[in-house]
Amino acid sequence: MKTLIIVDAQNDFMPGGSLPVPNGDQIVSVINTIQPKFDLVVASQDWHPQNHISFASNHPEKDVFGTIEIQGQSQTLWPDHCVQNTNGARFHPKLNTDCWEAIFRKGTDPSIDSYSAFYDNGHLKSTGLAGYLKEKGSSQLFFCGLAADICVYYSIFDAFKEGFACFFIEDASKALDAERFEKMKAEMVYHGIQIISSKEI
Ligand code: VGL
Ligand code: ZN
């Protein structure tokens, strides 16, 4: 049973958004092309309240892309992004959402950040996605979306730890820092996560 998980394909992560991923909009047509090949399609949506702890604007003494410690963990401070009910939080207008069975929102708690579509960064809270996929009988999970080196990456590793077979669709994903992501890809391969092209599905 093949499941596609589309991570955070939202306006704020697209060129022109508040936290743009270079060429992020190029994934939209690729994702639209592959969706019909899956038995189940779900998406995650970064969905922050304005007072979210990950926003540099809520730490006046800190700069954007600086870091703070949250419960012993380093947290990057981002520009305000994906604020609930704003245009930046909406999915790219050309992305076809018709066949999506569910959308899992994350980052809704003002005091914790959540890169993964499965758990927050401290693994304190679950979004319910792992249980949902298990109940649906999903075995093979295919990941795409934004940003490859942040939310897609953390989602894949959480899924892998939950025991799912994981595939990363390289041309349906873009990284914030492409150079750093090259090393992260090597780590994926090392763990048995398969990196594929959309044409191989
Ligand atoms: C993301 C940074 C902050 C992402 C979300 O979707 O990759 N990155 N929040
Ligand atoms: Zn976020």
Image (cartoon, helix red, strand yellow):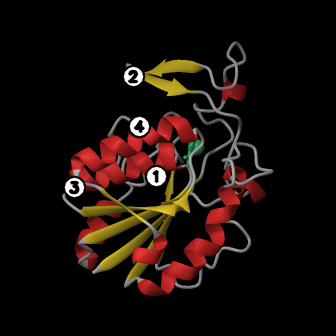
Ligand 1 within 8 angstroms of badge 1 C-beta: yes
| Residues at marks 4 and 2, CA–CA distance in whole angstroms | 27 Å
Could you tell me if residue 110 is visible in this image? no
- Side of 2 relative to 22 (left or right): left
Nearer the observer: mark 2 or 3; the answer is: 3
Q: Position of residue 126 (x, y in %)?
A: 34, 51
| Residues at marks 4 and 1, CA–CA distance in whole angstroms | 15 Å
Q: Earlier in the sequence, mark 2 or mark 3?
A: 2
Residue drawn at x 22%, y 55% is 162
The residue type indicated by label 2 comes to: Gln
Q: Say above or below: 157 vs 7.
A: above
| Residues at marks 2 and 3, CA–CA distance in whole angstroms | 24 Å
Nearer the observer: mark 4 or 3; the answer is: 4
Nearer the observer: mark 4 or 1; the answer is: 4
Residue 31, picture quadrant? bottom right
Q: Quadrant of the C terminus?
A: bottom left
